[in-house]
Image (cartoon, helix red, strand yellow):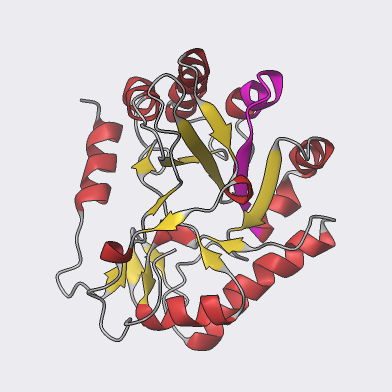
Amino acid sequence: MTDRALQAQALESRIRPDRTLAEPGLHIPGTGNVRQPRIALTFDACMGKTDDRILSVLVAERIPATIFVTARWLRGNPQAVALLQQNPDLFEVENHGQNHVPAVETKTTIYGIASAGSPKGVHDEVAGGADAMRQAGLSPPHWFRGATAKYDASAIRQIRAMGYRIAGYSVNGDGGSLLGAALAEKRIASASDGDVILAHINQPSHAAGEGVARALLALKKRGVAFVRLSDVEPIGDRDSTRDIAGLSGVPGQ
């Protein structure tokens, strides 16, 4: 295993001992047909550039996906934004926040990234991302996925009160874009009926993107029916949040 893969594995396996953070899961209804499973592709565009290895496959193969964008990524990638807008049948664009900080109201650090740290900080991260999308000419978002995909209970309540569903996932396809190409390909290509895949589309210099692109072709060859989150009624995983203090009554999606 490469050093990058080991690093990714360490990040993924890190568990907060106080168990105060939730990482919601998400599935979509499957087809029940092993020959034509249904899978939702979701990509985070956190900051930086655009991985054209992935985006070109999505466009050329007409594979639909849900893209979560930050204000930072939108500002730096006008050509990619235009391409998303030119293909509304393929892409739905959703909110990944303003500055790519974790939507956590308590002060903490997750994977080296300082959290929003207050109710106002969470509000500004969510609202700022939505404002940037509107300014870019994109449709108002309905889903939110925060940086690191981790939240505390109060942030989940606040985000839902702002009118958003929280986008979890069931398959971490690229380990935060830190996996090697072969491992990223294996993870995504092995997705099952009803899975929601999380990968990244903003790291063109990382090996993971090559594996993601190959996996998309493999899934299509397998007969997968790709959908966007808006195309189906997703199913949240209550188990991923039910043990969080004070979360009673708040669905996981």
Q: Is residue 129 above or below residue 108?
A: above
* Residue 29 pos. (x, y %): 45, 45
Please state if 219 lies on the left or on the right of 170 as rendered.
Answer: right
Say which of 78 and 195 sits in front. Answer: 195
Residue 53, image quadrant: top right
Q: Residue furthest left?
A: 17
Q: Is residue 158 above or below residue 225?
A: below
Q: Residue at x 66, y 74 (%)?
A: 127
* Residue 59 pos. (x, y %): 70, 25
Residue 183, image quadrant: top left
Q: Which image quadrant: the C terminus?
A: bottom left
- Verify whether residue 61 appears in magenta: yes
Residue 207, image quadrant: top left
Q: Is residue 235 above or below residue 35?
A: below
Q: Which image quadrant: the N terminus?
A: top left
Q: Residue furthest top?
A: 221
Q: Residue at x 59, y 64 (%)?
A: 97
Q: Is residue 87 above or below residue 213?
A: below
Identify the magenta region: 55-70
Q: Residue at x 68, y 47 (%)?
A: 92
Q: Residue at x 50, y 87 (%)?
A: 119
Does any portion of residue 204 appear in the rendered image?
no
* Residue 117 pos. (x, y %): 43, 81
* Residue 120 pos. (x, y %): 55, 87
Say which of 193 and 167 sits in front. Answer: 193
Please state if 113 lies on the left or on the right of 48 as rendered.
Answer: left
Does any portion of residue 127 appear in the rendered image?
yes
- Verify whether residue 117 appears in magenta: no
